Image: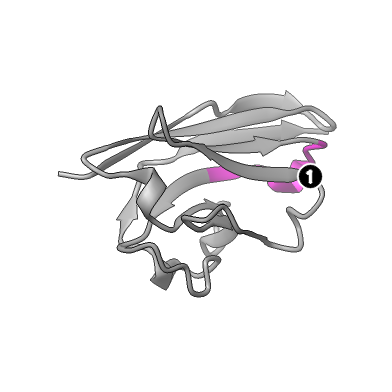
């Protein structure tokens, strides 16, 4: 079955950077809408960034200018580069894969049918 496996989370100080990876198996990153979401304790899961098959991106306001979503088609991997991290960025981060190339509302959970298990990001002040 489809597997999306995140890695790259960890603990950093405010202002630091992390790069999250999402390795896909039995699923082609190149041909699908892909996204990153996050969920902090007691909060709803929220969309952070989305990327369609042509490379068009969409970011949450909180991520604009600091986060960059990208993919490596050869390695079938999705990335999220996070710079200038803030304590409020602390959350579990999830990779999400859509069911087609179409990427309507890429920051909404309903756009995706496949999810990874998550990787924890903790930013200290």
Q: Say which quadrant the C terminus sits in.
A: top right
Q: Residue at x 38, y 45 (%)?
A: 29
Q: Whole-percent x and y of residue 41?
A: 55, 52
Residue that numbered label 1 is attached to: 66
Q: How many marks?
A: 1
The span picked out in magenta is 84-92
In the displayed structure, would residue 2 be above or below residue 37? Answer: above
Q: Residue at x 62, y 29 (%)?
A: 19
The front one of 90 and 50 is 50
Q: Whole-percent x and y of residue 87?
A: 76, 41
Asked whether 87 falls inside the magenta stretch, the response is yes
In the displayed structure, would residue 16 be above or below residue 118? Answer: above
The front one of 97 and 38 is 97
Q: Residue at x 57, y 52 (%)?
A: 55
Direction left: furthest residue:
1
Q: Say which quadrant the N terminus sits in.
A: top left
In the displayed structure, would residue 124 be above or below residue 41? Answer: above
The answer to whether 56 appears left or right of 114 in the picture is right
In the figure, residue 76 lies in which quadrant?
top left
């Amino acid at each position: 079955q489809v597997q999306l496996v995140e890695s790259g989370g960890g603990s950093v100080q405010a202002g630091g950077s992390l790069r999250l990876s999402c390795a896909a198996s039995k699923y082609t990153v190149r041909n699908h809408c892909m996204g990153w979401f996050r969920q902090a304790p007691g909060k709803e899961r929220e969309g952070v960034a989305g990327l369609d098959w042509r490379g068009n991106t969409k970011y949450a306001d909180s991520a604009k200018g600091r986060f960059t979503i990208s993919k490596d088609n050869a390695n079938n991997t999705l990335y999220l580069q996070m710079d200038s991290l803030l304590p409020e960025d602390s959350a579990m981060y999830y990779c999400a894969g859509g069911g087609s190339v179409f990427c309507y509302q890429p920051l909404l959970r309903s756009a995706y049918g496949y999810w990874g298990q998550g990787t924890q990001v903790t930013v200290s002040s």
